[in-house]
Amino acid sequence: MKTWRALGGALFLSGSLGAACGGSDEPGGTGGSLSSTGSGGSTGSGGSTGSGGSTGSGGSTGSGGDCQVGETTCAGMCTDTNTDAAHCGVCDMACPVGGNATPACTAGVCELSCTEGFGDCNGAASDGCELNLTSDKLNCKTCGNVCGVGKACVASTCVIPTPIALSTGRAHSCAIFNDGSVKCWGSNGFGELGVGDTNDRGYKLDDMGDKLPVVDLGAGKTTKAMALGSYHTCALLNDDSVKCWGYNIDGQLGLGDMLERGGQPSDMGDNLPAVDLGAGKTAKAIAAGGSHTCALLNDDSIKCWGYNGNGQLGLGDDDDRGDGPNEMGDKLLAVDLGAGKLPKSIAAGGDQTCAIVTGDSIKCWGDNSYGQLGLGDNDSRGDLPNQMGDVLAAVSLGEKKTVVVVEVGGDHSCALLNDKTVKCWGYNANGRLGIGDGLNRGDNTNELGDFLPAVEFGTGKTAKGLTVGNEHSCALLNDDTIKCWGDNGVGQLGLGDTMPRGGSSGQMGDMLPAVNLGAASAAKAIHNGAEHTCALLATGAVKCWGWNGNGQLGLGDTANRGDNSNEMGNMLPALSLTGM
């Protein structure tokens, strides 16, 4: 194919045998121009004349010309307008570029080549391939393929949604499903269920199943993780943003005001703003305490907002954040954990916060009335200057012990360690530390480190999961069973009585029964609320027990479960979350 080059201010065809009028017939000759003269003008061999000084028909040369058959000169280049997306059909007719698509030209007509998993279902090229066919229940795998009632589109297949993760608050519970949707039930006095009203759910039979609404988080938004506080709820979304709703008197929603969200129909969906974490900042993990919220960000920093009466935000004062303008975004400072100490995970409880940092140690700040920060005293940290950073000591859990998971309750904390043991510290009323007495740990010297006993689970039993409530603790063990200890006034330990466990000798180890969840009861995950517990089973079923005053067990009544005989095992119903 010939190529064009410029010479002396005119375009010439390199290697052409023809010459314009008055020019040389030598290749590359000067003194002429590419276009021929009008009538009477002549060209060299192989050239063509064209009235008005144009080239031959179609803009291409005749026999021996420069463009291949079927090509046209567009912007000085030989172009096939049948296939060129920049010149589709005619020169300069560019095919529009839309999202999730590559423009294509076929037989001179613009088309879209969709990214795998997306489709152009509205036929409008301007918005590209606008639908995700892997998750759109009205267009599952192909445009127009509608999933039936009660089904969702997961990985381009219509399936009945199943829960994959649980989260619990003071008196409400939420489940994340395999399609990224969320349903919540229980207490809703401040809109914490996110369903556009303030009516509790789960205390009536017709509250659950398909009648339990999906939380609307906005167009195209799905949920990756959740964190529930006392009366507020937060979700980490598929775009790594965070949205929060419910009670907001302390700014725990992070929206720069004290207005509740979720209790009115217009509060949710696209109307609910994401938390402003700062320019270029997104979230990797979230945690919620009683009335404060924290996020682990993409730059490996932590930011916290909401109630700060005990320094739980870690900012060196006791001023709330997020309840007024100009407090969020870049104005909200990150928690200083010390030189070289980057957070790997975060947990929040009543009025305190903990993070696993570089080296797999724990640093905690906030309320320390009972030694729950694990620092050998009962002085709060984070509410005064010069308490954070390098000054804030790590919790000592023993020689060669590192931390895998940290969980924070109302006034106590627990850690799952690298040797698959669990250690707990802080307030120990009713044996919530699981060490056979009622003495607090962490509020005096020589109580932590190797002095702190590990929780005994029984012969051959080790822990692989951990969760902490206000006054009770539970572990998921290596045999997929669950053992719980601490306060049991409403049956939250799931043992068929109201006797606490862990505060006296002879109550732990092999003497502590596992929770009876019935046949095929292997547990995958557990989560403690204030005084209730929920488990996700290997079958995909969810079972909850303990306090049920607001329907947080999701069983269609307000009767507690686990506080009397014949309430657990096969007698404890699984929740109906997707059908009746």
Image: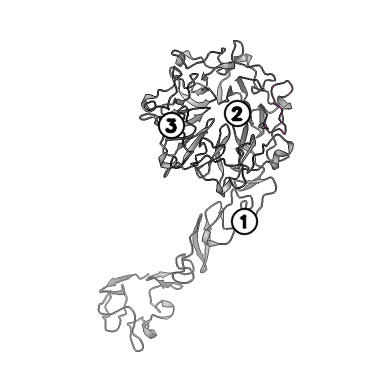
Q: Residues within 10 Å of mark 1 (few under 14, many from 20)?
A: some
The quadrant of the image that shows the N terminus is bottom left
- Kindly identify which numbered label has been placed on residue 143: 1
Q: Amino acid at mark 1?
A: Cys
Q: Nearer the viewer, residue 419 or 84?
A: 419
Q: CA distance from mark 3 to mark 1?
A: 44 Å
The 10 Å Cα crowd at callout 2, few under 14, some 14 to 19, many 20 or more, is many
SS for callout 3: strand
What amino acid is at disc 2? Gly
Q: Look at 61% across and 51% down and name the residue there.
A: 141
Main secondary-structure element of the magenta-colored stretch: loop
Q: Which residue is mark 2?
A: 529
The percent coordinates of residue 28 (x first, y second) are 27, 75
The residue that label 3 is drawn on is 343
Q: Position of residue 218 (x, y in %)?
A: 57, 48
At mark 1, the secondary structure is: loop
